[in-house]
Image: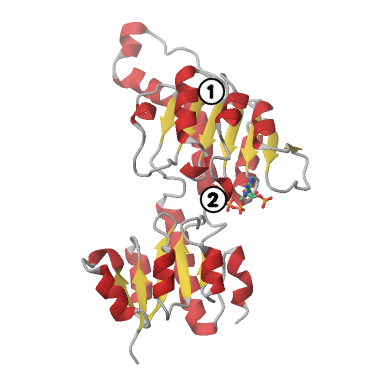
Amino acid sequence: MPKRKLLQIGNITSRMADRLESEFDIIEYFKFQNKEKLISDNAKEIVCVLTDGHWGVPDNLIERLTGLEIISSYGVGYDAIDADFAASKNIVVTHTPEVLNNEVADTAIMLWLAVYRQLIQADRWARQGNWEKEGSFPLSRSVQNQKVGILGLGRIGETIAKRAKAFEAEIHYHSRSQKDNDYHYHISPKELAKNVDVLFVITPGGNSTKHLVDESVLKALGKSGTLINVSRGSVVDEMALIKALQTGTLGFAGLDVFEAEPIVPKELKSMENVVLTPHIGSATTQTRQSMGDLTCDNLLSYFKSGKVFTPVPECSKLNLL
Ligand code: A2R
């Protein structure tokens, strides 16, 4: 029997390729010059798409792949896939929640510490010989006993909160819904920002959260406030953020995500009150391996038993095949 055709959008690891090659005929989308011909020649035979949070799957591809049954995405955020549209066509979308909670939370805490303790400047001070020439590095700010805000108290947000508590933090949050815990709930992102020293942004991306952090939220966070974004660039109004940091309306930022990745605005690159990382939230060998395993498990299980492990909420009912 010929192998099922899998359309691969984006990169996969060799471990993932090893697991999938025996089951699937893997078609690497980006290797084809004539994508139009590739799709028209294989529209009925491609039964699965493997993609990631960055590339997703365009709606017109979902529309044209008439044999498509499952989209398995490598990452928890799936805002680049219209999951409602896929579900309406009986296509299951899966993602990789939970296995990256600790890593993304660690990245968030790393950025917080780097901003407060001026890690980048201190490293430069040591490397460039300023210690010998000018003496001790100037005092920085302590992360102890801060009011910590979490915008999006979901799986990763909760993991950030647990870590922040180890620094004696008082936890505040805003989510769509209030949770049953002893953290302080705020009715809006602006109210949350007004009441904290540091604001961690960890909602999903997409239309419903676009520019949830706008000029008014940044102003409420204030001139000694710090914004840490490890969610999606789209959640923060980047133009407003640049202006707020330039004018001192907002004090500091630690950013792992940007609106037009991989482009990092030049204004941010030149700021001393900002720490920048290139979307490395979950990017360790161990966590990417777990994410890759789950991405493959979903695909292999679907074709073996009709079940998947981690469908996105929009498709959870389709799992009952
Ligand atoms: O469903 P709720 O009430 O727990 O709220 C979710 C919250 N959220 C929002 N909060 C305020 N305004 C919104 N429009 C809004 N939309 C969603 O974000 C929930 O507390 C949180 C998301 O949590 P999870 O679904 O558990 O996602 P997880 O695994 O923590 O990942 C979050 C994002 C991914 O979508 C990637 O973009 C990134 O982290 O790596």
Whether residue 108 can be seen here: yes
* Secondary structure at numbered mark 1: loop
Point out which mark residue 207 bears.
2
Q: Looking at the rendering, which quadrant does residue 28 occupy? A: bottom left
Q: Earlier in the sequence, mark 1 or mark 2?
A: 2
Point out residue 293 in the picture as x, y percentages from the top left corner: 45, 66
Whether residue 204 can be seen here: no
Locate the N terminus by quadrant. bottom left
Locate the C terminus by quadrant. bottom right
* Mark 1 surroundings: few (<14), some (14-19) or many (≥20) residues within 10 A: many
Task: Note whether 164 is above or below 279 in the view shown.
Answer: above
- Looking at the rendered structure, the kind of residue marked 2 is Asn
Task: Note whether 265 is above or below 219 in the view shown.
Answer: below
Q: CA distance from mark 1 to mark 2?
A: 25 Å
Q: Does residue 269 appear left or right of residue 79 in this picture?
A: left
Q: Which residue corresponds to mark 1?
A: 250
- Looking at the rendered structure, the kind of residue marked 1 is Leu
Q: Looking at the rendering, which quadrant does residue 87 occupy? A: bottom right
* Mark 2 surroundings: few (<14), some (14-19) or many (≥20) residues within 10 A: few
Point out residue 317 in the picture as x, y percentages from the top left corner: 64, 73
* Secondary structure at numbered mark 2: helix
Point out residue 201 in the picture as x, y percentages from the top left corner: 57, 40
Q: Does residue 45 appear left or right of residue 171 in this picture?
A: left
